[in-house]
Amino acid sequence: MDYGKILEEIFLKIQPYSKEGRQATYIPALANVNPDRFGMCLCTIDGEDYCVESADVRFSVQSISKVFALAMCLSLRGESLWERVGKEPSGTAFNSLVQLEVEKGIPRNPFMNAGAMVLADILLSSLDNPEEEFLSFVRALCGSDSICYNREVAMSERETGFLNAAIANLLKYHATVENDVERVLDFYFTMCSLEMSCRELAKAFLPFANHRDGFAYSGFMLTSSQVKRMNAVMQTCGFYDEAGEFSYLVGLPGKSGVGGGIAAIYPLRYSVAVWSPRLNGKGNSVMGMKALELLTTETKESIF
Ligand code: GLN
């Protein structure tokens, strides 16, 4: 398969959508990003990389960080993790409070904000230096020691994150989180502020594509069965209330973030990451989704 040529063609084909959607501005620091950037990188499990445009420019991974936090929590807690957070699609926005109230403080899944705050809480309770250990884990996954949090983005979200603060307080009220609400929020926003390029994200997702081997990075181990199950959660819950649409159009397990990134995998073949800051109404990258839809259509490779 000539992925290099296919990626170049996709970049040309998605140009009509280049002004569709709007970048996230509810996190003030994200409003400074040039909305016209685009990058894409595909890494095969045989060790080939194919990149187009700004594939080496780092951006705010935001909710894609939830995948890494889930991997660490699964490694630490195993199946007992699911007593604290569900694994069902929510059908609601990533920052929805509605179900959390009705379902007595147990988030539907680890990829909505409430669920990721439970992951943050577990890491805070289990690790001596959660910020450092999270960063070391992702650095090991992507093989790059220079990726970092962006303090300005984290602080900017902290100052305006009233809805996330409400979610954290509701979790605390129901005793789903153990740690201090402010500490949980700080760590959650810090993880979201991680910056990576498409190439680094694709590399970090490659172990999920290569699920047969399981993996061990920076002291966190997952069996092949756990990796496979994480992919199932990405498939059903990775795109909030657009998980069905993403399955329908793209057909790959993946995860999006409001920085405009999407990372996805085709099991036993490749991982792929794409970045374009303009989002649709559900908070997913317009060009990113279009590019991935074309990728699985042109290659006739999807899990369906
Ligand atoms: N930090 C963002 C928030 O909590 C992450 C949301 C996202 O990327 N979908 O709103």
Image: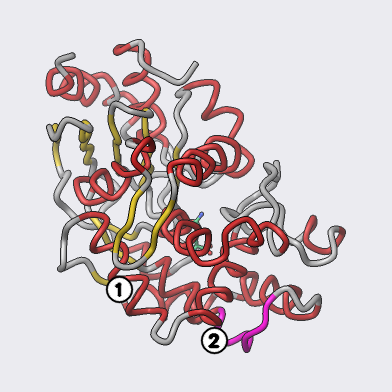
Asked which quadrant contains residue 137, the reply is bottom left
Foreground label between 1 and 2: 2
Under mark 2, the amino acid is Arg
Ligand 1 under 8 Å from disc 1 Cβ: no
Give coordinates of residue 228: x percent, y percent.
Answer: 48, 38
User: Which of the two residues, 216 or 287, is positioned nearer the viewer here?
Assistant: 216
Using the rendered image of the protein, determine whether residue 215 is visible from the camera's viewpoint.
yes
**What are the residue bounds of the magenta stretch?**
177-184
Q: Earlier in the sequence, mark 1 or mark 2?
A: 1
Residue at 65% x, 64% y is 114
Residue at 37% x, 62% y is 31
Q: Is residue 125 left or right of residue 284?
A: right
Task: Say whether residue 183 is magenta.
Answer: yes
Task: Say whether residue 106 is magenta.
Answer: no
Under mark 1, the amino acid is Asn
Q: Find disc 1 in the rendering and name its residue.
A: 150
Asked which quadrant contains residue 136, the reply is bottom left
Disc number for residue 183: 2
Asked which quadrant contains residue 3, the reply is top left
